[in-house]
Image: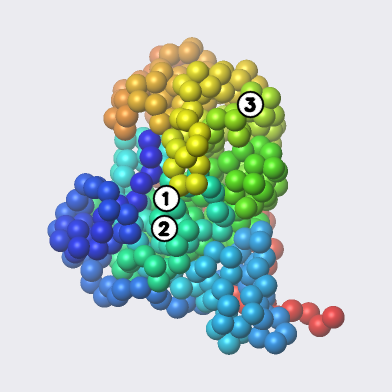
Amino acid sequence: MRDTPSLNRRSFLRAAGAGACALSAAPALGADVATDLVENAKPRTVVHEAMWYERLPDKAVRCLLCPRECVVAEVERGYCGVRENQAGDYKTLVYGTLCSVNMDPIEKKPLYHYLPATPALSVATAGCNMECKFCQNWRISQYRPEQVESLVVPPENLVRVARNRGAPTMAFTYSEPVIFYEYMHDAAAEGRKHGVGSVMISNGYIREDPMRQLARHLTGVKVDLKAFTETFYADQCAGHLQPVLHTLEVLADLGMHTEIVVLLIPTLNDSMGEIRQMATWIAKHMGPDVPLHFSRFHPTYRVKNLPPTPITTLDRARKTAMDAGLHFVYVGNVPFHEGGHRYCPGCGKPVIRRVGYRTDTSNLSGGKCGSCGRKIPGVWSQGQALAFKVPEGKGPKTTPGALRAEPG
């Protein structure tokens, strides 16, 4: 179930969404989508004020968006490569500069407990705040905006396309949406005004206040939990584990619908002891009903020396996580696997069956198991998705915008 960006610029102009840097085939979205998106579109970069940063002496800035908290001198960029200090003002260069636009099934994200069998208008810009050696979308995540083909799609245009194409959801995905935070924030806010939900498909590497602010406009989140050891994050992702765990705790505190995906890579993060610790932590800090997906690894990018994940490892991981108390554990990237179905934790019967991205929801009725009537946690209607609101008193403690560093 790979989330692969596609559509080059020529294909976009001829048939579908925004241009992409990857050249793999994708289904056309239709000429009307092209018309909607091309209107007022421009190539390359767009300079837009960043929402989370602090001004420092000598026109330097400190980024307050992700845990790296990059200190950036004038005319330099942060680690992500898409944020630049321009005369002491911090700017994003990818506001609406989409290098991939596709209409995907929501199951491809993967989100299994969120509006099953519905489409999601899925978009990305260049850039990322990690460098995962096994990234399958490295041709956009590890490139700067000047290096990929993109077109500018304002938030209102994106929402219009979603509505015109009957997509109840916009998905910010493929690369790392945290680095195009401002666009995601504004598009999600615009979407809510018009009855369109928004989900963030992310590595979870974001500071608490930006996450709490963004959650005011989102309707769901999927977090890629790369592993459950600091060593893996440092060696394989150039990041840290604890900030991701904190993001998961914040999402649980907000009551946001959240699903977790773990890509199991042979010898690197697939020990049953680590998986047991991970599942135990999830059950304790987020609850037993959080969906957990174990996905099969395929050699790519800088990790081509390891084989695909054995299916037996995925089976053992699923059993281990369920034994640790999690109710909804799935196996991904394995067609026709029984671990792709959703089973009722009450009677054990399938509630939703999946074959690839084809979904049978006939045994799900009003969010309940059709066999025994047990409530199945999830988001089962657009009304339920849009009804989510950040609880009173749980928003950000600081206001988005540039802060001035205190003297001394």
From mark 1 to mark 3, how far is it between C-alphas?
Answer: 25 Å
Q: Is residue 16 visible?
A: yes
Q: Of the residues under marks 1 and 3, which one precedes in the sequence?
A: 1
The residue lying toward the viewer, choosing from 348 and 392, is 348
Q: Is residue 188 visible?
A: no
Report x, y in % for residue 107. Answer: 37, 37
Q: Position of residue 217 (x, y in %)?
A: 49, 57
| Residue placed under numbered mark 2 in the picture | 140
Distance between mark 2 and mark 1 Cα atoms: 6 Å
Name the quadrant containing residue 99: bottom left
The reply, left or right, for residue 4 in relation to residue 394 is left
Name the residue rendered at 64%, 75% in the picture.
72
Question: Picture coordinates of residue 267 (x, y %)?
Answer: 60, 30
Labelled pair 2, 1 in contact (Cβ < 8 Å):
yes
Residue type marked 3: Ser
Quick one: quadrant of the C terminus? bottom right
Amino acid type indicated by mark 1:
Asn
Q: Determine which residue is flagged by label 3.
A: 271
